[in-house]
Image: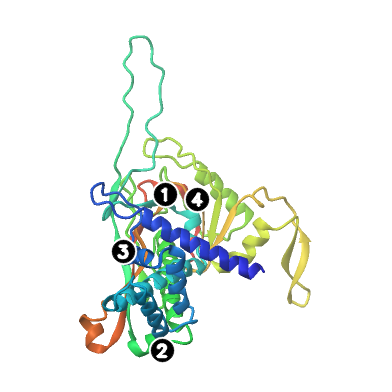
Amino acid sequence: MPKLQEQARKMEDRVASLRESIERRWDVESDETTRRISESDASLVALFGSPEEAIKRADQWMSGRKNARKIRESLYEVERTGRLREATAYGTMAALTRLGANEIMADAWKEVPHVWEDVCFQTTAEAGYLPIANSFMPSLPREVRMKQEFPQAQFQPMGKIEPMIKVGHLIEVPTELEEDDQTSQIGQLFSRFGKGIGIWKEIAFAATLTGQSITEGDLTITPKTYTDPDGTTGLYTTSGNRKNKTSNATPTANALNAMNVLLKSIKDTDGKKVLVTPDTLVYDPTNDFLIQKTFAGSANDIMLTTTSSGTSVLNTTELTSSNPFKGKLKLLECRYLPAGAWYYGESKSFSFIEAEREGIQVLKESPDSGKSFEFDCSRWRDRWRGAFTVAPGGARFWTEGSSGN
């Protein structure tokens, strides 16, 4: 029963997503949108009568319950009712396939273990770039006496312009494989497409958080050099008003206490405290055991101890001192950080930003043109447009316990 309820919930979510897409279609006159839907999606809903029916037909093939040939035959049943002409059946098939692929990708990327959603300030870019203000407060108010002029506040409305980038790739599938698929491998292919975008986002976040290049397989993401409003470069520094780094240390209670004091003492370019409210630890898997033991456990923690014979064993030992941070921090394990790296700061602050111009989508080349026609294949391209960046002054909201290097 729980499995059926979960399937029903996913179906409801997908239908609601398609309905929302249709209701928020591109308005040329107002030029305002947060999401776009192609004409083919809208035509499918009009053809089949409802988003539920359109998604059902797309899901039938992608899940392997029907192959492309059987789906096309079912389209001819619709044609016989007078709602679809034979000449458009093939185009409708392509639109149906694309809809199914997009729905699978939209679900699949969320299955990737990721933490960037819990850390980044998320926003939508309305153009090919995103204007970002700095994260500082204006100057503090002062006493104004009778007939005295009010002091001018120091306010900087613009920080920088961040251009959007585009990521994705292209794949070719033989027509025979697509039409005769009985194992849902086409659906699995688009699931991997979606997961690939999800992995790229997590690596991009790791590179942005650390300020250093991150390599995974044949992919290397190098972040832009961070420039602070005070003119210095680099996310983490050991000097000045924005000192947010000490010597590399393991994430113990004492180390976190030192980082907590450091972070709450950080000042802006005018010498005012930034008033950071740290609540999150982001770390790589090699630190997981120590962090869980130190910050997530109870008074009696399972710890490693060494016996007289030199063997390391698990032993229940009560901590010699209480840890006031225990149970109060959000603990996030990022698998793409360098070994031993950990960071402490305020999540969802105006520091690390994920800006999205266009969500994950997959497009299919017209089957009667281009290389699809020449090589009798199905060509697909996935894409995402957006950017991961750091707001001017945003480095002051995070500290580096260790870079892992």
Task: Give the residue type that dot 1 points to.
Answer: Ser
Q: Considering only order in the chain, which callout, 3 or 1, is on the residue closer to the N terminus?
A: 3
Residue at screen point 44% across, 73% down: 57
Does 233 sit left or right of 292 as displayed? Answer: left
Residue 46: x and y, percent?
36, 63
Q: Considering only order in the chain, which callout, 3 or 4, is on the residue closer to the N terminus?
A: 3
Which-is-in-front pick, marks 1 and 2? 2
Residue where numbered disc 1 is placed? 351
Does 332 sit left or right of 121 as displayed? Answer: right
Task: Give the residue type that dot 3 points to.
Answer: Ser
Task: Give the residue type that dot 4 points to.
Answer: Ser
Q: Considering only order in the chain, which callout, 2 or 1, is on the residue closer to the N terminus?
A: 2
Mark 1–mark 2 CB contact (< 8 Å) = no
Residue 216: x and y, percent?
42, 74
Label disc, if present, on residue 20 of the rendered structure: none
Residue 186: x and y, percent?
42, 81
Residue where numbered disc 3 is placed? 38
Residue where numbered disc 4 is placed? 347
Foreground pick, 150 / 244: 150
Q: CA distance from mark 4 to mark 3?
A: 35 Å
Mark 1–mark 3 CB contact (< 8 Å) = no
Q: Residues within 10 Å of mark 2 (few under 14, many from 20)?
A: some
Residue where numbered disc 2 is placed? 180
Q: Quadrant of the N terminus?
A: bottom right
